[in-house]
Every structure is written in structure tokens, then in C-alpha cells.
């Protein structure tokens, strides 16, 4: 029995990466759920909005780096975030003005909105590839690690190391901050209350004098903020490549639906649940069990539930299971 | 006489005319992946292959003074149907006597099965490395100047054993190249007594490889063998391994050896080592010399192989005294291997003369080519190691 090493091993390969990943998914799912709550459609262009905002942040970061401005040990990208958010918000408002408003005035079905959002997704994807290209872009600077596996081993004398990257901590801290601000906004401010009223019952909200255009505008701006932050954090922690934002769309939708569509708390819960299931189901527990078992005993197989090839299948399974068993999600949301 | 008969006669007459036009001209198909994933590699390769053709043609010694011309065809790399159609055109309407190509293993297999064997035309690929091509049914018509990945598996095993590494984990990029190399390596390494703790595929173009690395780390091993691509998942796997402290030593096969990797990771992967096709024979240097004022670099990947593929075809024709595939297919190994006068790049005229006089040649060429087994290059490899943040040559195998 060697519980300490087992715990460190588990933290290093499962807990820390899954928590950071969960925070990234939660931010993405919040944006999807917000648009669903206010505008009542599944916005498939959300992944590309993340990529677009992150792209603006990267271009601004490069300019800052060229000018020699940086944040010391912190990534310069944090300084560039407001610019990226501004650009993404303009992009979101423009697509609403020239695409979604047309269907809103016609009172189209939600499915028409969703299909239109697929079109927006492709146009935005093309635009991103024209501007920054399809390749990997590196823009992370500052210190990479808070503690490396080797330092941890030397410090504690344990056999297993625990590496914590700075970007993982930034991701979690920023995500918590953004979530807290969002809830304060929705619960306490006048605009937030108007948005919730509009989301609950559109006709009643209109009767009580809420300006629908203003609510829609604020929803898009908040979505752009969430998308840019989520895209940038994901890019900082992993890598920025436009294509990956199409792939991350599936776990994001799985998170939003699992938590209950239109429910901000549900989106956060869903994000962490999807991330933990993805990582825990594909992790090989061989070494972990070897530490917990009797001295000298090692399991013969890798003790892995699913091969890592099936990582994305986990999101699919969750999605299908939720839609079959509890279509409203964990916290009773709208039914897609 | 009806309309149809007239057409047949007209066609026959045309065929006769074109046949006379090619009577003192031999055509070689340059079937390479001019478009698609290998397009950047192929431009200099085709020029290298055509350089040898021009050299033989200009010498005036080829088959008693015949000229040789190259006819290009696009095999793409991933579209087997397009490759087959291009090969069909080269053989049936252009009337090529042999094919230098195709570039990728998949296209090569399709062309060989559907066109080359059916028409009895010799094919020499400069760059198809899939082990599956070693055992393919080819009626003795298929050769390659690039070694099979099975050979690289053996060289990797040898390097690991020399360094006393007893157990490794393996990850490969999930395609024909990665899978073929990983399988070949695992077989060779386990046969030599080493142990492979885990094999996990990785998909290219993902953002996050921590789950793959986590599984491999659980299995353990002294180092991680990364059979992937330098600018794709291979780099991601190394990054995730370093980040989580799972592995800090890597074995890097040919797809991973390049300055881009050393520049990116620098001394954080100090001591990692790899294998890459290469030779210290004077032929490689001569290829560079030969192409200096031709507008391309003769030492680029697979350019010497392409030159050698053309040269072997032409020398075999000269040795057999015929440009008919059935006649010269048996002569390719004869001119490639000892005994005989050693021939380096740029010495084709000398070789053609020796063969015309009834002598023997041992073609060395740009890659020190030596054909073994089913007509494929034995393969020379360079062992490299990261020292001071740069790839440095350790030795040759």
C-alpha cells in the first residue's frame, strides 16, 4: 500500500488535467446555453466564435510581444484579452444583424436558426483560415510551470511527480471569476433580470416594457466574452489550431445538454462532468492500482475502461444517454 | 465495308504511325504525387528522376543511340482511383516502357495491382515504404529504392539494444505509415528480447494528448517511441509527456527527425535519439554537386532515391538490350548489386558503355543502393542524437 504515491499519480494524470479541461468546457457551454436561453436555438457557430476571438487575441499578443510589452511571468495574452473580446463582440453582433435578425423578424422555427448557424460556422471558419491560416500558432509566453514533475519529486521525495502548469491554474481561476461575474450580472443587475425575464416568457417580458433588441445585443456580447476567454484559455493551455475548435464543439454541446439547456449552473456542472468522465474512463489504472494493492503486485492488463481512441465517443454516449433518459438535463432545462 | 471497319483501320493506321514515332525513343513514366499531401516533396523528386533520364539520353550510348524521354503522370497520394487512371494513361496511350513511381504506398499498391501487373510493365518506386509491399504479388515487376519500414524497425531495435534499453512504450500516428512502422518495430524489438509495455495510436491534429500519454505512462517503459510526424500529433505527444513528466526520453523514427523538432524542444529532450534514412557514401554528396545548377537540391528527401530509380530502370534495359519489361525485369537486381564496376551519380554514360561492351556494373548511386529480398533497397540509416539542443549524427547503419 502506498496511498500517497497513488494519489499524486491520480492527481497528475486525471484530476489536474480534467479540472482545467472541465473549466474550459464549462465556459464554452455557458455561451451555448445563454444563446439557447435568450434566442432559443442551438448555435453551432459557437466553436468558431471561440476560434475567432482567440485569433484576435493572438494577433494582438504578437503585436504586444513585438513592442516588448509583457506581463512578466504571466502570459501576455491576458493583456490582449479585451481587444479580442471587442473584436469577437463586433463579429457576433454583425452576424446577428445580417443573419439571425432576418429569421427573428420572420419568426422562423428554431431549427431554421440552427441551420443558419451552421452556415455562419463555415463562413467564420473560412475567414479564420484566410486571416491566420490553418496551422498551429504559438503565442504562450511567461513561465510554463508552477511546479514540474521533477521538482515535485525532489521536493517531496515521492516516486511520482505532480506537474502543475501555470495555464491550468489561470484557466481555473479565470473561469471561476467569469462565472461569478456572470451570475452576479444575471441575478443582481437590471439588464440581467431583464434577460432572465425575456428567457422565461418572451411575451410577458415584452408587455412589461423590456426592449428585446437590447436583450439580444447583451446576450451576444456576453457570449462573445465567454467564447473569447474560453478559446484563449484553451489555446494557451493546449494549442491554437483553428480545426480543434470544430472538434471541441461536441463535448461543449454534450455539457450544455447534460446540465440542462438554458441553465447556466447546469452548463458548469455539465462541463466538469463531461471532462471527468472523458478522462477517468480512458485513463489506464495499472500503476494506480499497483500502488494501492499489496507490495510487489502489478495488474497484468492496463486496467483501462476505454481505449483513448474512444475519448470523443464518451461525449457522444453522454449526449445520447441524456437525450434518452432525461431530455431536460440534470437541472430541468429546455428540451431541444 | 461498313463504318465500324473503317474506324478500326483508321485507328490501326494511327497506332502504326505513333509506333514508328517511338521506335528510336524510349519513354519512362514519371508517376508521382504532384498534387496532394506530398506535393512539396515531389517537385524535386521528379526533377531528380528526370535528371538521370536526361543524362542517359544525352550520352548517346543508350540501346545503341536511342533517346529517352520522361512522361509525367499525377499519382496524387491518397486517391487510388486517380493514380490508377494516370498509370493507365501512361501505359496504354503514352506507351511508357517502365514507371518511376508511385510516391505513396497506397497509390503504389493500387497502380501495381490494377495496371502494372496487368500490362506487364516494370515499376520502381523511390519512396513507398510500407512493409506490405514486400510480400505483394508482383510477377517480379516491382522494385523500390526506398527501404521498407520493416527495415527501419530492425535498425531501431539495433540502436535500442546498443544503448541497453530493455523496455519501451510505443505511440504511432493512426495511418498506414505509423501503423506499419509500429508493427514492424514491435515485432523486431520483441524478437530481440526487448519488451513493449504498451502501444497506443494518436490522431493527428488534436489539441490535447494528455489522455494518450496518461495511458502510456501507466504502462511504463524506459522511453517513448514516437512514430509520428514532427508538425502533427508526434510533437503533441512529446509536449504532453514532458508536461506531465511521464517520459523525458524519446526515440524518434524518420518522420520525427528534423530541425523543427530540435528548435521547438531544444535541450528539454536532450539525449533523445532517432534514425533517419541516410548514408555516408560519396554518392549522396555527388547528388548535391550534380544538381547545384539545376534549380533543385539533390539531397532533399527521396531525391537521390528518385534518381536511382530512373538509373536502375535504364541500366537494366541496357543490360538486357531491350526496353521490354519482360526482358529487363530480371536485370534490375543484376545492375544494382555486386559484382561489377561501382557507379556513382553522374556516371551513367560510363555504366552504359560498360554494359554495352558486355561488362558488369554495381550501381551505387545517390543512396548506396543494394537490392535485397523482393527487390527493395536494403536501406542505410543515420543514427542521430539530440546534443546541446540539436540533432547530431552519431553513426551510420
Image (cartoon, helix red, strand yellow):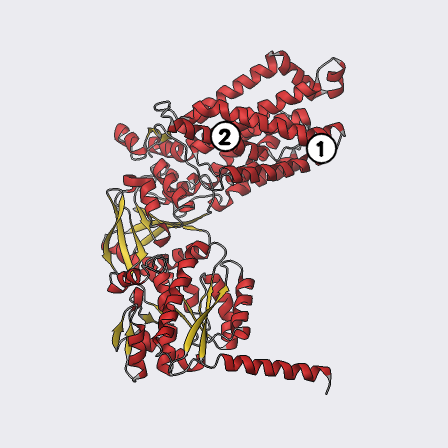
* In this view, the mark in front (1 or 2): 2
How packed mark 2 is, by other alpha carbons closer than 10 Å (few <14, some 14-19, many 20 or more), is: many
Q: Tell me the element at label 1.
A: helix
Q: What chain does badge 2 belong to? A: A
For the N terminus of chain A, the image quarter is top left
**Labels 1 & 2 near each other (Cβ < 8 A):** no
Q: Tell me the element at label 2.
A: helix
Give the mark nearer the N terminus: 1 vs 2: 2
Q: What chain does badge 1 belong to? A: A
Q: Nearer the viewer, residue B347 or B364?
A: B347
Q: Position of residue B278 (x, y in %)?
A: 29, 59
Residue A201 as seen in the image, left or right of residue A75: right
Asked if one can make out residue B357 in the rendered structure from this viewpoint, the answer is: yes
Checking the image for residue A76, the label placed there is none
Q: Nearer the viewer, residue B107 or A234?
A: B107
Q: Position of residue B84 (x, y in %)?
A: 54, 66
Q: Position of residue B329 (x, y in %)?
A: 41, 78
Q: Are marks 1 and 2 on the same chain?
A: yes
- Say which residue label 1 marks: A110
Q: Residues under labels 1 and 2: Cα distance?
A: 30 Å
- Say which residue label 2 marks: A56
Asked if one can make out residue A264 in the rendered structure from this viewpoint, the answer is: no
Which residue ends up furthest to the bottom in the rendered image?
B1
Question: Is B201 rendered above or below residue B368?
Answer: above
How packed mark 1 is, by other alpha carbons closer than 10 Å (few <14, some 14-19, many 20 or more), is: some
Q: Nearer the viewer, residue A146 or B351?
A: B351
Amino acid at each position: 500500500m502506498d496511498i500517497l504515491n497513488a494519489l499524486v499519480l491520480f492527481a497528475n494524470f486525471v484530476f489536474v488535467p480534467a479540472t482545467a479541461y472541465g473549466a474550459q468546457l464549462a465556459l464554452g457551454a455557458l455561451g451555448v446555453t445563454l444563446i439557447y436561453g435568450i434566442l432559443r436555438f442551438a448555435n453551432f457557430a459557437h466553436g468558431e466564435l471561440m476560434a475567432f476571438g482567440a485569433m484576435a487575441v493572438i494577433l494582438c499578443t504578437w503585436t504586444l510581444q513585438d513592442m516588448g510589452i509583457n506581463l512578466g511571468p504571466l502570459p501576455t495574452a491576458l493583456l490582449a484579452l479585451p481587444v479580442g473580446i471587442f473584436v469577437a463582440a463586433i463579429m457576433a453582433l454583425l452576424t446577428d444583424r445580417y443573419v439571425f435578425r432576418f429569421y427573428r423578424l420572420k419568426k422562423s422555427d428554431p431549427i431554421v436558426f440552427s441551420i443558419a448557424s451552421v452556415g455562419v460556422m463555415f463562413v467564420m471558419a473560412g475567414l479564420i483560415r484566410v486571416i491566420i491560416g490553418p496551422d498551429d500558432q504559438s503565442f504562450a509566453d511567461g513561465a510554463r510551470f508552477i511546479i514540474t514533475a521533477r521538482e515535485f519529486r525532489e521536493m517531496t521525495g515521492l516516486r511520482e511527480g505532480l506537474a502543475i502548469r501555470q495555464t491550468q491554474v489561470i484557466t481555473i481561476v479565470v473561469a471561476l471569476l467569469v462565472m461569478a461575474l456572470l451570475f452576479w450580472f444575471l441575478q443582481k443587475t437590471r439588464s440581467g433580470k431583464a434577460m432572465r425575464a425575456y428567457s422565461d416568457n418572451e411575451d410577458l417580458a415584452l408587455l412589461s416594457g423590456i426592449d428585446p433588441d437590447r436583450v439580444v445585443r447583451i446576450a451576444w456580447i456576453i457570449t462573445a466574452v465567454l467564447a473569447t476567454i474560453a478559446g484563449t484559455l484553451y489555446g494557451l493551455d493546449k494549442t491554437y489550431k483553428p480545426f480543434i475548435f470544430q472538434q471541441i464543439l461536441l463535448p461543449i454541446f454534450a455539457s450544455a445538454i447534460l446540465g440542462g439547456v438554458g441553465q447556466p449552473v447546469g452548463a458548469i456542472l455539465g462541463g466538469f462532468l463531461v471532462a471527468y468522465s472523458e478522462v477517468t474512463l480512458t485513463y489506464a489504472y495499472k500503476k494506480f492500482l499497483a500502488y494501492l494493492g499489496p507490495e510487489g503486485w502489478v495488474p497484468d492488463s492496463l486496467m483501462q475502461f476505454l481505449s483513448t481512441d474512444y475519448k470523443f465517443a464518451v461525449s457522444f454516449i453522454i449526449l445520447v444517454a441524456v437525450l434518452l433518459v432525461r431530455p431536460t438535463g440534470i437541472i430541468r432545462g429546455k428540451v431541444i | 465495308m461498313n463504318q465500324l471497319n473503317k474506324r478500326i483501320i483508321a485507328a490501326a493506321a494511327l497506332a502504326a504511325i505513333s509506333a514508328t514515332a517511338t521506335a528510336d525513343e524510349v519513354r519512362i513514366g514519371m508517376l508521382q504525387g504532384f498534387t496532394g499531401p506530398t506535393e512539396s516533396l515531389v517537385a524535386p523528386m521528379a526533377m531528380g528522376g528526370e535528371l538521370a533520364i536526361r543524362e542517359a539520353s544525352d550520352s548517346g550510348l543508350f540501346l545503341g543511340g536511342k533517346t529517352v524521354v520522361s512522361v509525367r503522370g499525377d499519382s496524387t497520394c491518397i486517391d487510388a482511383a486517380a493514380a490508377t487512371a494516370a498509370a493507365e494513361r501512361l501505359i496504354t496511350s503514352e506507351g511508357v516502357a517502365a514507371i518511376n513511381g508511385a510516391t505513396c504506398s497506397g497509390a503504389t499498391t493500387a497502380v501495381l495491382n490494377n495496371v502494372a501487373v496487368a500490362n506487364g510493365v516494370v515499376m520502381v518506386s523511390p519512396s513507398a515504404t510500407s512493409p506490405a509491399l514486400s510480400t505483394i504479388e508482383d510477377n517480379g515487376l516491382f522494385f523500390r529504392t526506398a527501404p521498407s519500414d520493416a527495415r527501419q524497425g530492425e535498425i531501431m531495435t539495433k540502436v535500442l539494444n546498443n544503448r541497453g534499453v530493455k523496455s519501451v512504450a510505443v505511440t504511432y500516428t493512426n495511418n498506414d505509415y505509423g501503423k506499419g512502422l509500429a508493427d514492424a518495430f514491435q515485432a523486431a524489438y520483441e524478437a530481440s528480447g526487448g519488451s513493449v509495455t504498451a502501444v497506443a495510436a494518436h490522431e493527428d491534429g488534436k489539441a490535447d494528448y494528455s489522455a494518450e500519454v496518461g495511458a502510456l505512462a501507466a504502462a511504463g517503459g524506459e522511453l517513448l517511441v514516437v512514430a509520428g510526424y514532427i508538425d502533427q500529433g508526434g510533437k503533441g505527444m512529446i509536449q504532453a509527456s514532458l508536461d506531465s513528466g511521464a517520459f523525458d526520453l524519446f526515440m524518434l523514427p524518420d518522420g520525427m527527425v528534423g530541425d523543427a523538432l530540435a528548435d521547438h524542444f531544444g535541450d528539454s529532450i536532450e539525449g533523445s535519439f532517432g534514425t533517419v534514412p541516410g548514408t555516408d557514401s560519396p554518392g549522396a554528396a555527388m547528388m548535391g554537386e550534380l544538381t547545384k545548377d539545376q534549380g533543385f537540391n539533390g539531397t532533399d528527401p527521396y531525391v537521390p532515391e528518385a534518381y536511382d530509380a530512373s538509373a536502375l530502370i535504364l541500366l537494366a534495359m541496357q543490360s538486357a538490350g531491350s526496353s521490354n519489361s519482360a526482358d529487363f525485369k530480371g536485370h534490375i537486381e543484376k545492375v544494382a548489386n555486386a559484382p561489377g564496376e561501382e557507379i556513382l551519380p553522374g556516371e551513367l554514360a560510363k555504366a552504359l558503355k560498360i554494359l554495352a561492351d558486355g561488362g558488369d556494373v554495381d550501381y551505387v548511386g545517390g543512396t548506396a543502393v543494394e537490392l535485397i529480398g523482393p527487390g527493395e533497397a536494403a536501406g542505410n540509416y543515420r543514427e542521430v542524437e539530440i546534443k546541446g539542443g540539436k540533432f547530431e549524427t552519431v553513426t551510420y547503419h
